[in-house]
Structure formats: structure tokens, C-alpha cells
Image (cartoon, rainbow, N blue to C red):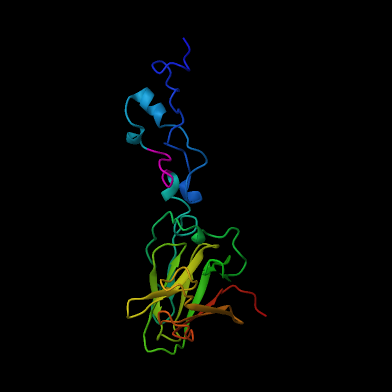
Amino acid sequence: MNYFNSAISNPFRSNPFGNMGMGFGGLGGLGGFFPGFGGSLANAWLGHSASTLPSWGGSAVGGWGNMGWGNMGWGGHHHVHHHHGHGGHHGPSGPSGASNSNCRPVHPAPKEGQWNAGKGSYTVGQSGKVDVNVGKADADFNNEIQYRVNGGEWKTIARSKDDGSTSTIHARPGSNVEFRINTPEGNSFQAGTSANVDGIDHAKVSKTDSGFQLGFEDLRGAGGDFNDAILNLSDPDRRRP
């Protein structure tokens, strides 16, 4: 009998390497290395749908994917320490498996933290820290200032009128930290054009002696002066001149 032409005797006849997969979605976003074992093979041998089996791969974003590199760099957690009269606050670990490819950690991490214009975010250096100082803003709104690490949960760090307050964000080296403002009108704006509903860049970044200054514009659709919220970002382990 030709087992490769027999639907009855040959469990390999119908796509033996089905859709169950052994992909590592979280290590790179979508998919795995190849479709993997399962699918019709499980149907032929076990007599029921492979979808009832516990999957090591599953759909394009399944399997081990949602563990992934995680929201916090390599699966670790991050927290922020505020320096204005009370102990630091350790935020909870964010959701794992960030799917935004622009938010993947940078490896190897740069020696010092730096602004990544292509991603509209700050890349954490080998110190694993970024100091955030709120500068003096010139705006009517007292905007909420938030950050997130590697595309995870947004967390409030200060308000735009908290000038002089300083905090330290702790994250895995190579992590990408994004910043945004939330206005009392219900708008959220951040660096880059694609991230904003009006398609306009609402943050201006400039290099300073200590690191980078991030200035925000809080009016929708306006060119603005980019001084409605000011953040000074620096790596505490940066090289001194």
C-alpha cells in the first residue's frame, strides 16, 4: 500500500505540519521560526481539532509570544523614584509582550542614555536609569506628564507646573522610554507625528550639556512654541566634560 497516497492509513497526507507552531512571537513580534508541528497531524492521530491542544505557538502572535521580551526590557520591571521629599514609588510591572516594533529594547544598550529620533523615545543607557527634571513651563494648562517603557503602561510622573521636581526612572539598559502630556481638554500629545491624532509633532528635542531637553506643545493643530511642558532628561552616569 502506498501510505503517502492513502487518506486512511497516512496521517501525513494532509498538511502534517499544521498551524500549531513553535513560534517565538514575543521575541520579535509576529510569527515564529516556521509553522511547526500540529494542525492536521493532531486531527489525524488524535481525532479532534488541534485547537483543543495547549499551543506552543498557535496564531501569528501566540505561543511563547506574550511572554516575549516583555514590557520591561528583558522581562524585568521598572519603577520611578521621585526626589521631592518622600520615598520612591515602585510601580507595578507592566503588561508583557509589547507588539509595537518601535518599542523593542535596543541591544546592546548604549553606554549613555540618548534620544532616539527615529523612535521618538529615550534609550536607557547602561546605568539603567534616566533622571527627569521638570523645567519651567509657560502655559495656562497644568498638563499631566506621563512615561512608558517599551510600549507598556503609561504612568504619571509629574505635572507641567511642578517645575524643579526631579524623578529617576529605572529600567533595563536598552529600554525605550516614551513621554507624553495629557491636557485638561482630553488630548494626549507626544514626540513624533504618527503618534498624534492631528499628525503634527508636539515635542521638540534639543541637546543640552547634561543630556536632552524635551519641550511640548499642548494645543491641537498648532505649530506652537513647545514650552507648555519642559522635561530635562539625563543619564546619571554620563561622562562629565
Residue 86 falls in image quadrant: bottom left
> In the image, is residue 67 part of the stretch drawn in magenta?
no
View extreme (top): residue? 1
Does 30 sit left or right of 237 as displayed?
left
- The image position of residue 70, as x and y in percent, is 45, 55
Residue drawn at 61 percent across, 65 percent down: 110
Q: Is residue 136 above or below residue 145?
A: below
* 117 or 169, nearer to the observer: 117
Q: Residue at x 42, y 79 (%)?
A: 221
Total number of numbered discs in the rendering: 0
Q: Is residue 61 magenta?
A: yes
The percent coordinates of residue 106 (x first, y second) are 56, 60
Image quadrant assignment for residue 93: bottom left
Q: Magenta part mainly helix, strand or loop?
A: loop
Q: Residue at x 38, y 28 (%)?
A: 42
Q: Position of 30 compared to 46: left or right?
A: right
- Residue 90's place in the image compared with 222, above or below, is above
Where is residue 18? Give x, y as percent. Answer: 43, 33
The foreground one among 32 and 87 is 32
Residue 45 lies, in percent from the top left, at: 38, 23
- The residue closer to the viewer here, 99 or 157, is 99
User: In the picture, which quadrant includes the C terminus?
Assistant: bottom right
Residue 216 in sight here = yes
Which residue appears farthest toward the right when viewing the image? 241
Q: Is residue 78 above or below residue 60?
A: below
Q: Is 225 above or below relative to 168?
A: below
Toward which corner of the image does residue 39 lie, by quadrant? top left
The answer to whether any part of residue 89 appears in the image is no
Magenta span:
55-63
